[in-house]
């Protein structure tokens, strides 16, 4: 006997990371942890370990479109989450999907910089993101460095945030993880101003995969019906706990333990 699930569905566009630290693997664990179901579209393959990425291979744009449509035509999707795309053609493919499904909220984590600090998008791809995706985003999660890549004409952080919102983004959750200090301060922007700041104790270990963990859990919490402020607060708490419980599987950076809650219940 079968029954229809009541779990919200998140459609994720992101990369495959063989380490499991980021990308689709991170999305699935974070989304499941919030009681939702993850459907996935692989945008690119990455060759990387816990220290660096050595290669990125984009998936054909036709495959991206076909994969997404196969899910969307079969399953009611509550939220779309976009992570690392990997190519200009991939951006355009996702844009075509978003145009056909304008009523599905979009959480966008541009993932423009890798764990080793290398930029993951060329000029054409960045231009396409600016022109084709930002206006579809209900909320963007990113770092100041990524904001600078997307709004290069801005000479300060406030101008970067204004530039993103002028392009149509409703909300921005700006990470302060790379700033100095013992406390990490993240800021939520809406209507051209900061509406809330969140403070988190800085953790000692360098952990890769935080951005994917945060944005995927945020997408799931929005799908569960939380408002943006509450969803951002709960997603950050989940992400911080995942980082706090992080483990070092390789010779480089730690990665989040997104299923930490399973062990706490034992």
Image: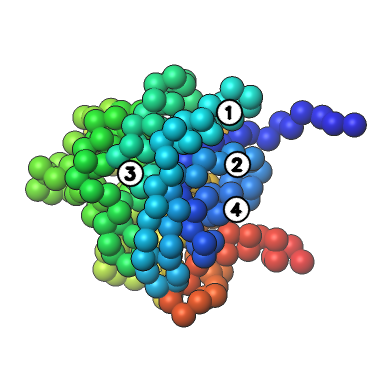
Q: Is residue 185 left or right of residue 66?
A: left
According to the image, label 2 marks what residue?
38
Q: Is residue 56 above or below residue 164?
A: below
Would residue 107 be visible to someone looking at this image? no
The structure residue drawn at horizontal position 10% and vertical position 42%, both measured from the top left corner, is 153
Would residue 48 be visible to someone looking at this image? yes
The structure residue drawn at horizontal position 55% and vertical position 41%, both measured from the top left corner, is 40
Give the CA distance from mark 3 to mark 1.
21 Å
Name the mark nearer the viewer: 4 or 1. Answer: 1
> Which of the two labelled residues, at mark 3 and mark 1, occupies the earlier sequence position?
1
According to the image, label 3 marks what residue?
87
Residue sitting at the far bottom: 251
Q: Where residue 29 is drawn, which disc sits there?
A: 4
> Which of the two labelled residues, at mark 2 and mark 1, occupies the earlier sequence position?
2
Q: Residues within 10 Å of mark 3 (few under 14, many from 20)?
A: many
Which percent across, then down, holds residue 25? Answer: 55, 54
Which percent across, then down, holds residue 52? Answer: 37, 69
| Viewer-nearest residue: 243 or 47 | 47
Residue sitting at the far right: 1
Q: Residues within 10 Å of mark 4 (few under 14, many from 20)?
A: many
Classify the position of the C terminus by image quarter.
Answer: bottom right
According to the image, label 1 marks what residue?
70
Q: Is residue 111 left or right of residue 227?
A: left
Q: Is residue 151 left or right of residue 221?
A: left
Q: Secondary structure at mark 1?
A: helix
Q: Secondary structure at mark 4?
A: helix
Which percent across, then down, holds residue 195? Answer: 33, 40
The structure residue drawn at horizontal position 21% and vertical position 41%, both measured from the top left corner, is 124
Q: Secondary structure at mark 2?
A: strand
């Amino acid at each position: 006997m079968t029954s229809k699930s009541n779990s919200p569905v998140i459609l994720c566009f992101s990369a495959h990371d063989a380490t499991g630290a980021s990308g689709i693997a991170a999305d699935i664990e974070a989304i499941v942890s919030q009681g939702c179901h993850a459907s996935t579209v692989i945008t690119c393959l990455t060759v990387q370990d816990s220290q660096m990425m050595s290669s990125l291979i984009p998936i054909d744009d036709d495959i991206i479109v076909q994969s997404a449509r196969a899910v969307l035509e079969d399953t009611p999707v509550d939220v779309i989450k976009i992570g690392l795309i990997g190519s200009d053609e991939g951006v355009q493919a996702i844009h075509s999907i978003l145009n056909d499904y304008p009523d599905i909220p979009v959480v966008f984590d541009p993932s423009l910089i890798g764990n080793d600090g290398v930029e993951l998008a060329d000029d054409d791809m960045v231009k396409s993101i600016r022109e084709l995706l930002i206006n579809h985003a209900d909320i963007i999660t990113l770092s100041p460095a990524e904001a600078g890549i997307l709004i290069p004409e801005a000479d300060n952080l406030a101008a970067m945030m204004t530039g993103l919102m002028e392009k149509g983004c409703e909300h921005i959750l700006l990470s302060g993880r790379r700033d100095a200090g013992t406390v990490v301060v993240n800021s939520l922007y809406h209507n051209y101003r900061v509406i809330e700041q969140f403070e988190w104790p800085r953790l000692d270990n360098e952990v890769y995969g935080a951005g994917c963990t945060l944005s995927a859990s945020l997408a799931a919490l929005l799908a569960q019906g939380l408002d943006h402020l509450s969803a951002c607060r709960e997603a950050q708490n989940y992400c911080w706990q995942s980082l706090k419980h992080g483990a070092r599987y390789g010779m480089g950076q730690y990665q989040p333990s997104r299923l930490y809650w399973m062990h706490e219940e034992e």
